Image (cartoon, rainbow, N blue to C red):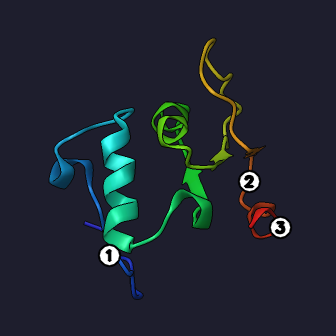
Amino acid sequence: AAAIAGHFDAVITAEQVGFYKPDPRTYQAALDQLGVTTGETLFVAGSPFDLIGCAQIGLPVYWHNRIGTRRPDGFPSPQFEHSDLFSLPGSL
């Protein structure tokens, strides 16, 4: 198993919360655990399915669409979409 060094304020998994993408309760649990609101947060998504759950609670999304996946019909639009993370700091 790979390890990531560093300090994290929280680690939230769908298994802990008991709900999986795109259920908005998983995203809301992360906000609650961190003590932040959607207005203070930008979710960095790696999957278009994150767009659904985040939109349901008003959580803005930076979609790191690294492989150029087409957003499925009917899926909400992210606030930002880029193929890399270089634009992320400017999106904050």
Mark 1 residue element: loop
* Location of residue 51 by image quarter: top right
Q: Is residue 61 or residue 47 the one in the foreground?
A: 61
Q: Label 2, label 1: how many angstroms apart (C-alpha)?
A: 23 Å
Q: Is residue 5 or residue 59 the one in the foreground?
A: 59
Q: Which residue type does callout 1 highlight?
A: Ala
Residue 41 coordinates in the image, percent (x, y)? 57, 63
Q: Is residue 16 left or right of residue 45?
A: left
How packed mark 3 is, by other alpha carbons closer than 10 Å (few <14, some 14-19, many 20 or more), is: few
Q: Is residue 54 left or right of residue 82?
A: left
**Residue at 68% in and 39% down:** 78
Q: Which residue type does callout 3 highlight?
A: Gly
Mark 3 residue element: helix
- Image quadrant for the C terminus? bottom right
**Residue at 74% in and 63% down:** 88
Q: Is residue 3 or residue 75 the one in the foreground?
A: 75
Residue 65 coordinates in the image, percent (x, y)? 67, 40
Marker disc for residue 47: none
Q: Label 2, label 3: how many angstroms apart (C-alpha)?
A: 13 Å
* Location of residue 6 by image quarter: bottom left
Q: Is residue 54 left or right of residue 71?
A: left
Of the two numbered discs 2 and 3 on the same chain, state the one appearing first in sequence: 2
Counting labels gives: 3
- Residue indicated by mark 2: 84
- Residue indicated by mark 1: 3
Marker disc for residue 90: 3
Residue 71 position (above or below residue 65):
above
Q: Is residue 92 left or right of residue 49?
A: right
Of the two numbered discs 3 and 1 on the same chain, state the one appearing first in sequence: 1
Residue 77 coordinates in the image, percent (x, y)? 69, 31
Q: Label 3, label 1: how many angstroms apart (C-alpha)?
A: 28 Å
Q: Which residue type does callout 2 highlight?
A: Asp
